[in-house]
Amino acid sequence: MARTDLDFSPAPPATERGRRTRRKLLDAATAEFGERGFHDASIASITRRAGVALGSFYTYFGSKEAIFRDLVRDLSDGVRRAAAERLAEREMSSLDTEQAALAAFLAFAREHSEIYRIIDESEFVDPESYRAHYEKTAERILGRLRTGAASGQLRGDLEEAHAWAIMGMNVFLGLRYAVWSDGENAADDAERAAQAANSILAKGIGPRTPD
């Protein structure tokens, strides 16, 4: 889809009130796009959910395409922050770091299950945002892998493909143990899934041992 001037959002609001209003619109858009999809969603419905006047929408976003694009970025940043907060809790080994990052993602996806529909739809609504989401996620994983390799905790021959493979595993674990798991034991199931994934990584990217 070709972008127009209306697809770009105005500058971020300078006041706290403006930031709160923008946040309300993004949260409402998450629910609207998550439930109805991009094409059936409407600006009027987003503003009703947010409790914001229809005309005020254009103070923060130029179009439905613009808020959708910013929402993809917002969700992607949410995943990044969730992982960063979990990893900042304590010092961890490289393998434990990957398990904690996955656990943080599963918790985020369980709370924001709309992320899957919205990110998937962005492939067609805004391909640049779709690609940027995955490229930036893979870059963060690759950075952690390189740190682990440099310290001798991980194999020394890890490369970009390893980061994308780990990300792919995490995405589908999120689908199964966050979006499709809503029972009483959902959190425990997600924790076990993160442990299972970590056991795979321990065999695949852990430091090589002598034969």
Image (spheres, rainbow, N blue to C red):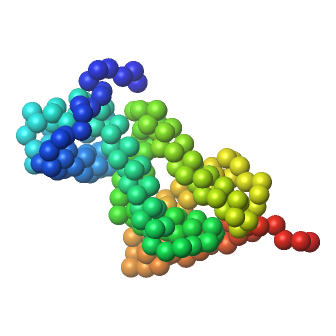
Q: Is residue 64 visible?
A: no
71 is higher (above) or lower (below) than 5: below
In the rendered picture of this protein, how many numbered marks are placed on residues? 0
Would residue 56 appear left or right of 33 to someone viewing this image?
Answer: left
81 is higher (above) or lower (below) than 104: above
Quadrant in the picture for residue 73: top left
Q: Which one is in front, 100 or 189? A: 100
| Residue drawn at the location 46% of the way across and 32% of the way down | 128
**Residue 81, horizontal then vertical, whole percent:** 40, 58
Q: Which one is in front, 123 or 80? A: 80
**Residue 149, horizontal then vertical, whole percent:** 71, 60
Would residue 108 appear left or right of 87 to someone viewing this image?
Answer: left
Quadrant in the picture for residue 99: bottom right
76 is higher (above) or lower (below) than 211: above
**Residue 118, horizontal then vertical, whole percent:** 38, 45
| Residue drawn at the location 77% of the way across and 57% of the way down | 156
| Residue drawn at the location 35% of the way across and 37% of the way down | 69
Would residue 121 appear left or right of 66 to someone viewing this image?
Answer: right
